Image (tube, coloured by chain):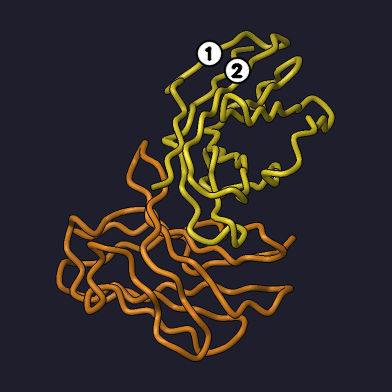
Amino acid sequence: AQKVTQAQTEISVVEKEDVTLDCVYETRDTTYYLFWYKQPPSGELVFLIRRNSFDEQNEISGRYSWNFQKSTSSFNFTITASQVVDSAVYFCALGSGTGSYQLTFGKGTKLSVIP
Amino acid sequence: GAVVSQHPSRVICKSGTSVKIECRSLDFQATTMFWYRQFPKKSLMLMATSNEGSKATYEQGVEKDKFLINHASLTLSTLTVTSAHPEDSSFYICSVENWDTQYFGPGTRLTVL
């Protein structure tokens, strides 16, 4: 069975602070995909990143960065110099070896960035 | 990526009525679409996988006769909540898969009175 754990239910930071959202996953598949999605108050899920299990390179996109570590089954997400617009619920998700079929979502982390 | 729309964005209906929600893939022909529901402050739960031209595959615990799915074309899937009850009130979201990534629609908020 697949499982995604986002231990942080809610996080509050002051604007410009850095924040890391944790994601730990469990799977028996040797090939799998990991995702992060952002859900702002409007409700629409916005795709942020996809990572294949065989690609452990960390990735940076602007103020966003992701740290994928297979040894600890973690795929953490860091926002540098947070902004109020970053306030949202962030979901980590795990896809089976066939891609994003049968996505398993974590419970989400609600991030509040205070001006 | 993929651009996905849903209609309506919000619907309020009386208990016992049926409600149809449309999910459209605007820039991509999707043989498969997914339907999720999300309760307030909760995560997304997959309800069913919608396959173009064939029957949908429902997740365990999801009533097929309650949540009718029709995927009649490569760009449109519909979810009909039949004989809706207040406990069906939720946020319903569809998605399409493109190049191993699911892209989500804006969601439909259903309130059953």
Image location of residue A91, percent across then percent down:
53, 38
Find chain B in the image and tell me its colour: orange
Q: Amino acid at mark 2?
A: Val
Q: Considering the numbered disc 1 on the image, is that residue within a helix, a strand or a loop?
A: strand
What residue is at 49 percent from the left and 80 percent from the top?
B51
Kindly identify which residue carries mark 2: A113
Is B80 in front, or is A68? A68
Q: Which quadrant, please, contains the C terminus of chain A?
A: top right
Q: Chain of mark 1?
A: A
Q: Considering the numbered disc 2 on the image, is that residue within a helix, a strand or a loop?
A: strand
Answer few, some or many: residues within 10 Å of disc 1's Cα (few below 14, many 20 plus, some between 14 and 19): few
Q: Chain of mark 2?
A: A
Mark 1 and 2 residues: CB-CB less than 8 Å, in contact? yes
Tell me which numbered mark, 1 or 2, is placed earlier along the sequence.
Answer: 1
Q: Which mark is residue A63?
A: none
Q: Does B96 sit above or below residue A106?
A: below
Image location of residue B104, percent across then percent down:
58, 58
Image location of residue B69, percent across then percent down:
38, 79
Occupied quadrant, residue A9: top left
Q: Which mark is residue A12?
A: 1
Q: CA distance from mark 1 to mark 2?
A: 6 Å
What residue is at 59 percent from the left and 48 percent from the top?
A30
Residues behind callouts 1 and 2 on a single chain:
yes
